[in-house]
Image (spheres, rainbow, N blue to C red):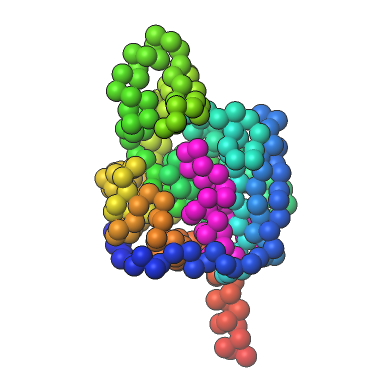
Amino acid sequence: MGRSNSTSEDCNLFSAVQTQQQRVIIKNSYNENLVGILHETGSKEVVIVCHGYRSCKDRIPMVNLAAAFAIEGISVFRFDFAGNGNSEGSFQYGNYYREVDDLRTVIQHFEHESRYVSAIIGHSKGGNVVLLYASRFNDVHSVVNISGRFDLKRGIEGRLGKDYMQRIKKYGFIDVANRKGNIEYRVTEESLMDRLTTNTKAACKLIPQKCRVLSIHGSMDKIVPMEDAMEFAKNILNHKLHIINGADHEYTCHQNELALIVLDFVKNNSSHDNARAANKALRSCL
């Protein structure tokens, strides 16, 4: 297990990097338009970055991670899952495997363009999605889970209240309001059961050994406890764990450190990096 420290000045060092950004729309299997931003470097290799629960492609750490890879000449695609951000569809509380389907559509889009998806990276709920994807498909061999939740039964009371099961059985739904009392979204019994029946442990055990998995977690994460990262380490065959001391769930003041850790992991198995090393070795022989 790796563990690292950084200071409060370790913030968004990659965010000022300017790259060619293209708005890309991909239609998913439910005929909904998924909207994303491609950081185009011209590489055949593409890394895909997935956002978390009720988030979007334009939040940290998605933007900062994309910029960090672009510096290295690796193209990155960050997109909104259906029902989030600029994408079509309605937001659903669970939807884990539905988002896996969205990710599958995105990967196939780049494969049809004769490009190679070298890694999938997910933050929070997106971390769960990339792991679930790896348990179902064998076409991506580097996966980064940033602050994913291992036990999906935890964290529900904090949003829905302690008596959530009784209320949803009685009414069929629970409306979730913000601090001002405005309804932000509705949790249906179907979407709640989708979350409760998504078996993360079983999925982790299905991830093949040839798939490299990195889990990163902040020691000060108050949304998903650090212990969840330990559980991923116990249940995934080819797994590396890195704890960032002092980091919160969003890595608010640890963006640079987070990006460097992810870059190092992905590049160790990157065709782009391997090709660059081969060219360097060839030049040394001339």
- Residue 198 forms part of the magenta stretch: no
Seen from the viewer's position, the closer of residues 41 and 9 is: 9
Residue positioned most to the top: 170
Residue found at x 30% / y 58%: 246
Seen from the viewer's position, the closer of residues 137 and 174 is: 174
In the displayed structure, 210 sits above or below 205; it is: below
> Viewed as shown, does residue 164 lie left or right of 263?
left
Extent of the magenta region: 43-70
Name the image quarter holding the C terminus. bottom right
Residue 88 is situated, as x and y percent measured from the top left of the image, at 66, 34
Seen from the viewer's position, the closer of residues 214 and 33 is: 33
Name the image quarter holding the N terminus. bottom left
Residue 14 is situated, as x and y percent measured from the top left of the image, at 52, 66
In the displayed structure, 194 sits above or below 243; it is: above
Residue 248 is situated, as x and y percent measured from the top left of the image, at 35, 52
User: Where is residue 240, by image quadrant?
Assistant: bottom left
- Residue 49 forms part of the magenta stretch: yes
Seen from the viewer's position, the closer of residues 154 and 143 is: 154
Residue found at x 44% / y 61%: 255
